[in-house]
Amino acid sequence: MGEIYEKMDCMIGEIRDLLINNKHAVDYMKMEEILVSRWEKMNITMHCLGFSLNPFFYDSKYLNAKAPGGVPRRAPNQDREVVAEVLKAFDRIGEDENEKAELRKQLAKFQNKQGMFGTTFARIDATTMSPISWWSTYGSETPELAEIAIRVLSQPISSSSAERVWSTYSYIHNIKRNRLNTKRADKLVFIHSNIRLLSRFTTSYKEGPCKKWDIDPESTYFDDSTVRLEDLRWDD
């Protein structure tokens, strides 16, 4: 989860590098516009939170190296969009103003490399350890933030959700209902998918005769790993 935001930026730069001396260079601006438009639809608060909590992206060697496309790299706390989304996430995770303030305080300690985060070992391991192992090792001084970081960075990157949307679309727009226009079909898919997601946080979905009604028992996809920002609240 922590790499999606950075990978998307790199992909746009890599395409720019490939096209710079290519006969299709004149089409780059149009391609970039399409990619940015898609990314704006895909980008969610969780992506920014994962990017901000990945210690690798604060490493000086990483930041000093040019990104694909020749663009200077910036630490997550220097990116206005990322900072705004992280604060939005904390606003949803914290149950009161004290908890929200504590999360901001712990984040500042992490980003400024204070305490354990500033040790030589922590700086070295940020580039060699997995982010989850790193937080498990060095997050003792910021336990609430460490718990959130581990849960967010543990989220798997999968296209299964997109595949399920296509399955839903084929169910709604079929041979017998092929006169539905695209706009109406999209709205029906949106409603169906979101009702399905909302139902997963009800008691009837977790137990009883309708338990996990929408999961194929033969599917190998582990869907229980998905969490909402509100689920990242820590226990007292």
Image (tube, rainbow, N blue to C red):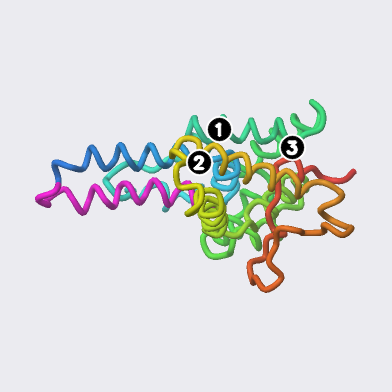
Extreme top residue here?
97
Residue furthest to the left: 23
Q: Earlier in the sequence, mark 1 or mark 3?
A: 1
Instruction: Check disc 3: other Cα within 10 Å, few if <14, some if 14-19, many if 20+.
Output: many
In the rendered view, does 83 fall on the left or right side of 195? left
Which marked residue is nearer to the observer: mark 1 or mark 3?
3
Expressed as whole percent of the image width and height from the top left, the position of residue 140 reads 76, 52
Check if residue 6 falls in the magenta segment: yes
The C terminus lies in quadrant = top right
Q: Determine which residue is flagged by label 3.
A: 93
94, 160: nearer the viewer = 160
Which of the pair 139/79 is nearer the observer? Answer: 79
Instruction: Count the numbered circles shown.
Output: 3
**Of tags 2 and 3, which is closer to the observer?**
2
Magenta span dominant secondary structure: helix
Q: Is residue 171 visible?
A: yes
**Residue at the spot 48% in from the left edge and 46% down from the top edge:** 5
Residue indicated by mark 2: 185
Query: Distance of mark 2 from mark 3, alpha carbons?
Result: 34 Å
- Tag 1: residue type? Val
Kindly identify the amino acid type of the residue bearing the numbered disc 3: Ile
Residue span colored magenta: 1-24
Per the image, the residue denoted by label 1 is 83
